[in-house]
Image (tube, rainbow, N blue to C red):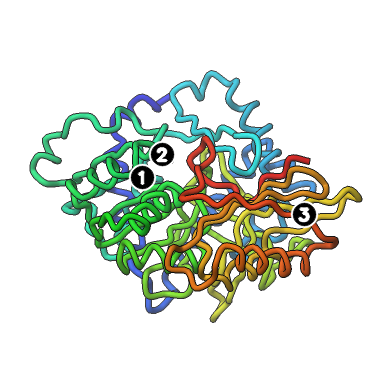
Amino acid sequence: MFEKLQKKLSNVYLFVDLLGLQKKEPRNYSKVMRAQEKNLQKLMRRAWEIPFYRERFEKAGVRPEDIKTGDDLTRLPVLTKDELRKWMAEEAKNPKYKDWYADTTSGSTGKPLTVLFSPKEKAFMKANWMRAMMFAGYNPVFGKTMSRINAHDENPGGPDTFLQKLGILRRSFVDQYAPEPEVIDAINAYKPDWLYMNKTELMRLVLYSNRTGKEIFHPKFYDPISEKVSENDRKLFKKVLGDGIIDSYGSAETGACMIRLPDRDYYIIYQDTFVVNVLDDNGQLARDGRIVITPLYKTDLPLINYEIGDKGTCRTSQGVHFITNVQGRMNDYFRYENGEVTSFFEVTPVIAHCADILQIRFIQESWDDIRVQIVRDEAASMSKEEIEKYLEENLNGIFKRPFRFTFDWMDVIPPDKNGKLRMIVCNV
């Protein structure tokens, strides 16, 4: 009913939200965890009023007052992408959502899904992104931001506003699909304080720079978003772009929920407005398992215990969860004719232990054949033939039975249509 007015007030909501958000890593988490519990209990009461969630509560034998802490969310079922897709499709038919935002995911984990956001929720997501920048020490008011063109941005690259002409909230967009020299020239001309685009898109520029010697301006901070950054990736990014690498983690459905800063070996969860749990196959808290996210700000159409599709490792200190490793998408598999699979995580150590490999993708073409697209460091200590032998011997030592390999040596591996790079493309 008030959505049109809310859209007009979106910048007001954004700044009010930003004022109330935790913007630095706390020294003492007690205040933040109290805020989490308060926001969680508010979300539970709201969810109880929604038929979709009322049914899930009742099947689990749980009432809102039973969920007092983030750990208590294990008493409720996990929300899968398929369940969310069906629910959102039904809700989208309701005319009352005509002035809401409908964001569509990239489809990197399967069929794209559309998620509805009220204007207030959308304003919070933008405030939350500014919070992520401020966590790193960036000033989004006076700094300069440069990003890829986003399908959800309205009129990207339009004329500067009055505030931007005064040097406030400056931002610029770059065509991530333009030729590498053109994109690098645009970055060098603008000299952003904060640069972000999909990891694969940014890696394309880094590989070009590394190969040709064309230098890229070093932003104070840069964030390769939407895909897992491996330790090999991190080394190359730092070599070409400097030490300011940020790893902001989240999804189009949830928004950014945690961040890894340049000098940290763990992710800091935004505990005031998110619960991030790692669950085993039985839905219980675990050290290693599935990453499950509950955005506490999303109270109009909530996402409770949303399984994002990644695996991770959790460390708990004084009741506070920290994510120490994100292992990437769970649906990347090598498949066998008998129905068995080998996950990408199982072969990751083989790739991580060969610093000469800058980029790699596996295309399983049959039950017996794998084509490997690969980019080699020109300063590599191993020859192409040695790398091929290393991969064949070590990978076939992990696979449940040997595969035949074909290698395509490339300067850069082109991204998928969504701008990302699937590590395994299984065509069987």
- Between residue 364 and residue 69, name the one nearer to us: 364
Q: What element carries label 2?
A: helix
Label 1 sits on what residue type?
Answer: Lys
In the image: residue 362, left or right of residue 165: right
Residue 290, image x, y percentages: 67, 60
Circle 3 is placed at which residue position? 404
Could you say which disc has been placed on residue 126 in the image? 1
Category of crowding for the residue at label 2, using alpha-carbon neighbours closer than 10 angstroms: few (below 14), some (14–19), many (at least 20): many
Badge 3 or badge 1: first in the primary sequence? 1
Labels 3, 2: front one: 3
Badge 3 or badge 2: first in the primary sequence? 2
Circle 2 is placed at which residue position? 122
Q: What element carries label 1?
A: helix
Residue 80, image x, y percentages: 69, 45
* Residue 200 vertical position relative to residue 92 in the rendered view, above or below: below
Please give the name of the residue rendered at 49% of the width and 73% of the height, measured from the top-left corner.
Answer: 381
* Residue 293 vertical position relative to residue 350 in the rendered view, above or below: above
Label 3 sits on what residue type?
Answer: Arg
In the image: residue 374, left or right of residue 119: right
